[in-house]
Image (cartoon, rainbow, N blue to C red):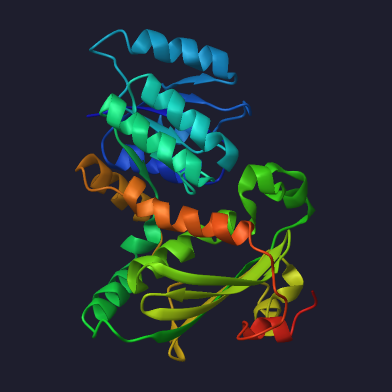
């Protein structure tokens, strides 16, 4: 059984990590979050220590790491994106392996530092790339790996997950803290596409705004027109009519790929892989982090060339 610490216990994704720690028969020793109403802890680890300030959490960790019998093995990081890098550094410097939510970090330079710290400490940093474990996506990977290497497929990716006014007043709405719309809601999809279709050859950005972005991505074996949005008005009318606020749509050579279900246990499966030294680390995340950084710093060219069909129907 491994001992865990959890940084960032209040966000919705933290519960998936609490469940994964419990379902892999491990123990949460301590959690920290600035929000101190943490009833969810009672469902998983009611005996775990809890701190609402980082200094107290740090003091507790330092004491724990002095004892070989109570030493904490892993630190799970579920804090806002801009805190991932300093919290990964903190964990490694205090002798803990790391499991970090996406994106592992925001900037390519941070990837390099994390890689060097891993080498210095002999510890590991893994992240959550659950789409790679989804049965539908895993089957796609197997299918396209078996085809001739010189084929180029046409792919359209649309992901709209509408958000209210709160979003833009939180850290998520601040590009310097979230990494922008592509890093915050798109990085799983970019990782999935690179994993299936190979390395990035060229990237064009047609639109990049605070609440939506779109472009054309050329991979080794695919041309991907992608569109990401947080805007409710961009949802298809058929989706709105159902009362839904999220729309995922991927087509490969005009064939629709459906994977709306099947996400329930993927965090637990990820934890099992990490604990068996088969997780997703620096080499896995680097390409998508480099890509989102490139997109964030590109000059949009507007509605020119081969752009996503959604751009013909929405207001910009």
Q: Is residue 128 above or below residue 54?
A: below
Q: Could you tell me which quadrant the C terminus lies in?
A: bottom right
Position of residue 153 measured from the top left corner of the image (x, y, whole percent): 40, 86
Nearest the viewer among 279 and 108 is 108
Q: Is residue 179 above or below residue 217?
A: above
At a point 49% along the width and 71% down the height, the residue shown is 202
Position of residue 174 measured from the top left corner of the image (x, y, whole percent): 71, 46
Query: What is the quadrant of residue 66 in the picture?
Result: top left
Say whether residue 24 is visible.
yes
Say whether residue 261 is visible.
no
Q: Is residue 191 above or below residue 159?
A: above
**Number of residue marks:** 0
Position of residue 71 measured from the top left corner of the image (x, y, whole percent): 29, 17
At a point 71% along the width and 49% down the height, the residue shown is 173
Position of residue 184 measured from the top left corner of the image (x, y, whole percent): 58, 54
Q: Is residue 58 above or below residue 97?
A: above
9 displayed left or right of 258 = right
Nearest the viewer among 191 and 255 is 191
At a point 70% along the width and 59% down the height, the residue shown is 163
| Residue lying farthest to the bottom in this orientation | 254
At a point 41% along the width and 80% down the height, the residue shown is 222
41 displayed left or right of 124 = right
Q: Could you tell me which quadrant the N terminus lies in?
A: top left
């Amino acid at each position: 059984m491994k001992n865990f610490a959890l940084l960032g216990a209040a966000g919705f994704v933290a519960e998936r990590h609490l469940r994964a720690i419990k379902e892999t028969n491990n123990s949460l020793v301590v959690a920290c979050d600035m929000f101190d109403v943490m009833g969810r802890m009672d469902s998983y680890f009611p005996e775990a220590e809890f701190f609402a300030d980082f200094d107290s959490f740090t003091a507790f960790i330092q004491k724990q790491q002095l004892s070989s019998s109570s030493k904490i093995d892993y630190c799970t990081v579920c804090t806002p994106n801009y805190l991932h890098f300093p919290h990964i550094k903190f964990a490694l410097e205090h002798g803990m392996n790391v499991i970090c939510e996406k994106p592992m970090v925001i900037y390519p330079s941070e990837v390099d530092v994390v890689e060097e710290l891993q080498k210095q400490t002999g510890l590991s940093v893994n992240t959550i790339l659950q789409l790679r474990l989804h049965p539908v996506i895993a089957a796609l990977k197997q299918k396209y790996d078996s085809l001739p290497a010189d084929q180029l497929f046409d792919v359209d990716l649309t992901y709209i997950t509408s958000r209210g006014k709160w979003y833009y007043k939180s850290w998520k709405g601040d590009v310097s803290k979230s990494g922008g719309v592509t890093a915050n809601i798109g990085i799983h999809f970019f990782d999935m596409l690179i994993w299936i279709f190979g390395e990035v050859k060229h990237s064009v950005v047609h639109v990049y705004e605070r609440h939506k972005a779109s472009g054309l991505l050329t991979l080794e074996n695919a041309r991907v027109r992608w569109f990401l949005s947080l805007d409710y008005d961009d949802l298809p009318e058929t989706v709105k009519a159902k009362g839904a606020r999220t729309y995922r749509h991927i087509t490969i050579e005009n064939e629709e790929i459906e994977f709306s279900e099947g996400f329930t246990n993927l965090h637990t499966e990820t934890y099992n892989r990490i604990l068996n030294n088969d997780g997703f680390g620096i080499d896995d995340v680097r390409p998508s982090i480099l890509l989102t950084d490139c997109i964030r710093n590109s000059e949009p060219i507007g509605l020119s060339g081969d752009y996503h069909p959604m751009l013909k129907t929405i207001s910009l």
